[in-house]
Amino acid sequence: MDRTVRVVHKTQEALGICSFELVAADNRPLPSFSAGSHIDVHLDGGLVRQYSLCNFPGERHRYQIAVLLDQNSRGGSRAMHAIEQGQTLLISGPRNHFPLAHEPRHSLLLAGGIGVTPILCMAQQLAATGASFEMHYCTRSTERTAFAERIRRSSFAGRLHLYHDEGRGQRKLALQPLLANASQESHLYVCGPTGFMDWVLGTARAAGWQEDRLHWEYFAATPVATSDDMPFEVQIASTGTLIPVAADQTVIAALAAAGISVPVSCEQGVCGTCVTGVIEGLPDHRDMYLTSEEQAAGSMFLPCCSRSKTPRLVLDL
Ligand code: FES
């Protein structure tokens, strides 16, 4: 359920990164959340953006999010940075597509830049339960490192390994040996820019990590070439209705034009809100949300971005 919250603190955490502390406008407790959860924030102009919660999971008197001002912003991060202390915002309840696994022997938490937000939340959760973990946090420079002081003052400061690409404290993460030497029972959690995620996940797979020990959350989908996109049709299984999808149209847009609404949020294949069952046909997956096994199974797809490899997809709608 959506709630109205008030921004009680807006803090510059690092160069280009602001955090926002949100409390319920009606002072009632906020829904509880687990580490790795995010909320949707509704912004002016119908924009909806997802931001990971980075305060301690279990806190219900507040949520905290942090936002990087993205130079290539599609509007969301610029709108967030323009928000002032005292303003109200409409947010969704928390949802978690990036949960901690149950009781792994050891957790490797890897954050790149603003990807620290869900990772920080996980570190607090793991530290609170006395679980075994280490946190590796890579940023461009000390000036761009959000929450460094907070982590240094935390009970898990000794588990933090900080790396910077440039400037003071320049040091690179030796990823290959870290992943190659990790125990077979470790789980890996990674969040950050697409290049960082691809590097970490690719190195883990090359080192023999199985998919069920890899956990990730992308912030943005990798751009896909669309010039060869072809029209196709979707069929609604419950009614038999056939709906054409033009070469330059998303399935979501085609469904909406036919009066069928599927819930959407990010509209770029990262949040999983629009996931829809596929009964027949072969999806052309373009999302960053489903695992490679789920994509290969072909029994669901993300209609906000994915298309079809077959002339028709029958959807479980
Ligand atoms: Fe986010 Fe489709 S709306 S994955």
Image (cartoon, grey):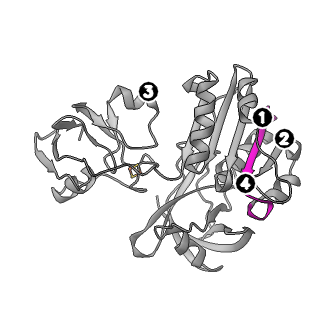
Work out whether mark 4 precedes mark 1 in sequence or the reverse, and give the earlier one.
1
Q: Any mark on residue 139, and which? A: 4
Q: How many marks?
A: 4
What is the C-alpha distance between the residues marked 3 and 1?
27 Å
Q: Is residue 274 left or right of residue 39?
A: left
- The residue positioned 16% from the left and 37% from the top of the image is 312
Label 2 sits on a secondary structure element that is helix
Comparing marks 3 and 1, which lies closer to the viewer? 3
Query: Which residue is at 55% across, 44% downward?
Result: 217
Indicate which label's residue lies in the foreground, 4 or 1. Answer: 4
99 left or right of 169 in image: left
* Mark sitting earlier along the chain (2/1): 1
Dividing the picture into quadrants, the one containing residue 77 is bottom right
Q: Which residues are magenta?
A: 129-144
Q: Amino acid at mark 4?
A: Thr
In depth, the one of 222 and 38 nearer the eye is: 222
Q: Tell me the quarter of the picture where residue 134 sits.
A: top right
| Label 2 sits on residue | 159
In this rendering, position of residue 201 left or right of residue 40: right
Residue 129: x, y in percent? 78, 37
Alpha carbon of mark 2 to alpha carbon of mark 1: how far?
A: 7 Å
